[in-house]
Each structure stands twice: as structure tokens, then as C-alpha cells.
Amino acid sequence: MSRRAVLAGIATGAGAAAAGAAVWPLAAAIVDPLLDDTSPQDAPWVEVAGEKELRLDVPLKATVRVAVRDGFFTTLVELGAVWLQKRPDGKITALSNTCPHLGCGIGLDPKGGFACPCHDSRFAIDGSYVNGPSPRSMDPLPVRVEQGRVLVQALRFATGTKVRRPI
Ligand code: FES
């Protein structure tokens, strides 16, 4: 093999390596989200109240906080709030207080049920849509009770859509 052919081979290899190094971050940025296997079902279960705090058919607002570890410190970060209710059959339900319209906090309506103060969407006591610009009913969250503590899964949903889509 001639000296010229060897040098040309080295130059070609170096060029290919340089091109690969330049393109890889871009390719990784495009492909990585597609390989991300986290899903809404992986949302954390968060303890929000004691079962004994709930009174029959009286909605209780509970804050959803998760512990976030940063180096040596653990900080509680507030994700939002839920409305818990205990039904006559003993079942406990949770409704996200995030309005499906644009995300304001939903409160109790003095006339009954729930109301959003931002654009006056109204919901029945079971969270079903009554009227206003909200595109859907309030978002229910999975609930479970463990050793007298009520836990909800901290799911979040897209706002402004008729279809309930976890994000
Ligand atoms: S954000 Fe609730 S009605 Fe608009």
C-alpha cells in the first residue's frame, strides 16, 4: 500500500469520527425522549390525609406534596391539591382541584358542588361537568388507603382538551 493511500485512509477515518462527534448530541436529543420509558402510570403515590379526617359526603381539600431530594437536603414540593370525599358506601374518591379549562384551582361552590373562580366553570359534587368553559368534568385520581392513611396518585392531565390526557 502506498504512503498516499495510508494517509488518505487516516484522513477519511478522522473526518468520519469528527462528523460522528458533531452529529451525536443532536441524534441523542431526538432519540432520547422516544426511549424514555417513564409514563403517567409511574406518577408517585402521595399521602394526603388521615382516613379519620374524612366526614361522610363532606369534601376535604388536601394538599399534594412530594419529597424532592437535592444533595443532602430533602424539600417538600407542593404539586397541587385534591378534593377527597367519603361516600356512604365507605368508598373514598379524589378529584384533582386543577381546572380542566386552564388550570386554576377549583373550590367549593357555596350553592353546592364545585366552582372555578377564574372563568366560572361549575361541577357537581361528584366532579361531573355542569356548565362553563371547562371542556370536561373534574379529573378523578386513583386512591388507596394504607394503615389509616389516604394516598392519591399524583397524576396530572392536559388542560383545555375534551379528552382526559395524562401528562
Ligand atoms: S380555569 Fe377554570 S374555568 Fe377557566
Image (cartoon, rainbow, N blue to C red):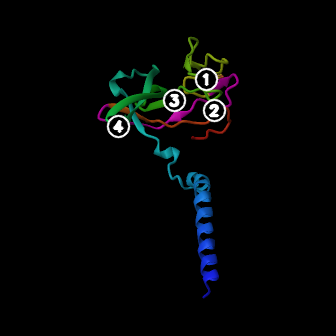
Q: Secondary structure at mark 3?
A: strand
Q: Residue 100 falls in which quadrant of the image?
A: top right
From this view, report whether residue 24 is shown above or below residue 114.
below
Asked if the residue at tag 4 contacts the one at tag 2, i.e. Cβ–Cβ closer than 8 Å, the answer is no
Of mark 3 and mark 4, the one earlier in the sequence is: 4
Give amino acid for label 4. Answer: Gly
Span of residues in magenta? 129-148
Identify the residue position indicated by label 1 in the image: 123
Q: Mark 2 highlights which residue? A: 159
Dot 4 falls on a residue whose secondary structure is loop
Residue 49 in view, yes or no: yes
Distance of label 2 from label 1 (alpha carbons): 16 Å
Amino acid type at image mark 1: Phe
Instruction: Kindly identify which residue carries mark 4.
Output: 71
**Mark 2 vs 1: CB contact within 8 A:** no
Tag 1 or tag 2, which sits nearer the N-term?
Answer: 1
Queried whether the magenta region covers residue 132, the answer comes back as yes
Is ligand 1 closer than 8 angstroms to the Cβ of mark 2?
yes
Q: Which comes sooner in the sequence, label 4 or label 1?
A: 4
Q: Quadrant of the N terminus?
A: bottom right
Q: Residue beneath label 3, please?
A: 95
Q: Amino acid at mark 2?
A: Thr
